Amino acid sequence: MKRSTVLFVCILFVTLVFWIAIIVIHKRTAHETARNELKTVIPAYAAKVEKTAGSLQLKSINPQYADKINKQVADLRSSEPAEDVNNLYHVNDYLFMNAMPDSQIIDIESPFSKDLDQITVKTIMTSRRFRKIFDELGKMNKAESSRLVNTNILSTMTDYLQIYQREVNLNPEKFPIATNNGVVLYARAGGPEYVILQPKGRETNKVISGVRLKLLSLVWLSGMLKLTDSKEAVELVVRTAIKQRNELYDSSTVEAHSRIDLLMRATLYNRQILSSGLLGVTFKDENAETRAMNTAGIQWEQKKLAAYDAAVTEFDTPVQSGVISPDYSTGSLMVKYVSPMTDTNFDLLLQELDFK
């Protein structure tokens, strides 16, 4: 090889290494800047909230917010995919406060308002663990991803049904209703009683909200990743959800407000997520998928999310309050889900899928 050629190759190699180093340093600097900005802005924001909204809201604006995020990210970085999927039931990973529907006007009458599904969709998106799993499973062999998903759906369904039966059982003693010639006179308005959040430091405690969110997360992930080998497991969740809907739509069992609360926070009946999962595991042909969705009157929606190790995500308090922008310096991912729908839309889709 000529000396000039060797020299050219060496120069090209050194140039390539130089630019790779520049890109890596730039990404690290951007991420560090985002974290420092977060640490700087939180105390100032806390002081502003204290003046305008009182000490009650101040409790949710912790000056140690950045440190909390750093610890959560460090724990996730050290965990394996199987461990991440298993721990999706850790309900304290989700941010319930920031997961309200786009529409603040909610129809609490039956049938179940389409706006209420968005609460769970947003709640799942707040989880950094969910984001990490989406990225991890997407890089794995689909057969391997399906095995991991299927195993967890089956084992978690057992836990879920046991907790649901124990804490939310719809017996007359728990939800007494007095009638006169078929007309409801009164019903206990206290609502269902079940544990929503895990006690601090007891993340291994399984509560109904945690196992529910895990099952719905796995259904959604199966759909987005087109895990057709998970079709049977996804359909098991859908059948359970439909059974719960039918039970709760019987007005003689539970009064209206309790019925809506149970559907929204305790059952698996979330039309957006169930539809997203079913469509993904059923169709390989996009044209067939589109025809089914058009008949059902639904469409896909998308949202860009920051990576799990971002300094601050779209749903963290500083971003929600307009103080700081989401940190995309470590990457981003695009999630998709079916648009909000009514029971009629959902049932039409089930017909198109020939769901039994």
Image: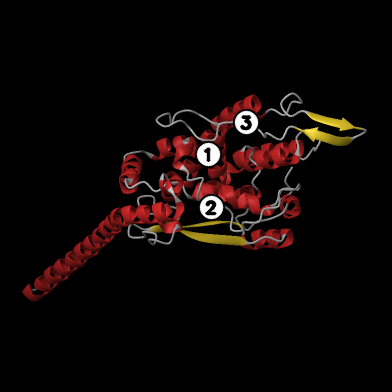
Q: Which residue is mark 1?
A: 214
Q: Which residue is drawn at the image coordinates 77% and 28% (left, top)?
A: 176
Percent coordinates x, y for residue 152 in the rendering: 52, 34
Q: Would you say residue 333 is visible in this rendering?
A: no
Foreground mark, 1 or 2, reads 1
Q: Residue furthest right?
A: 181
163 shown above or below 238: above
170 shown above or below 97: above
Do callouts 1 and 3 mark residues in contact (Cβ within 8 Å)? no
Q: Which residue is mark 3?
A: 193
Residue 39 lies left or right of residue 207; in this view the side is: left
* SS category of the residue bearing label 3: loop
Q: Amino acid at mark 3?
A: Glu
Residue 91 lies left or right of residue 183; in this view the side is: left
Q: Which residue is drawn at the image coordinates 54% and 30% (left, top)?
A: 155
Q: Which residue is mark 2?
A: 224
* SS category of the residue bearing label 1: helix
Q: CA–CA distance between discs 1 and 2? A: 15 Å
Mark 3 Cα-neighbour bin, 10 Å: few <14, some 14–19, many ≥20: few
Viewer-proximal residue among 226 and 34: 34
Residue 106 lies left or right of residue 246; in this view the side is: left
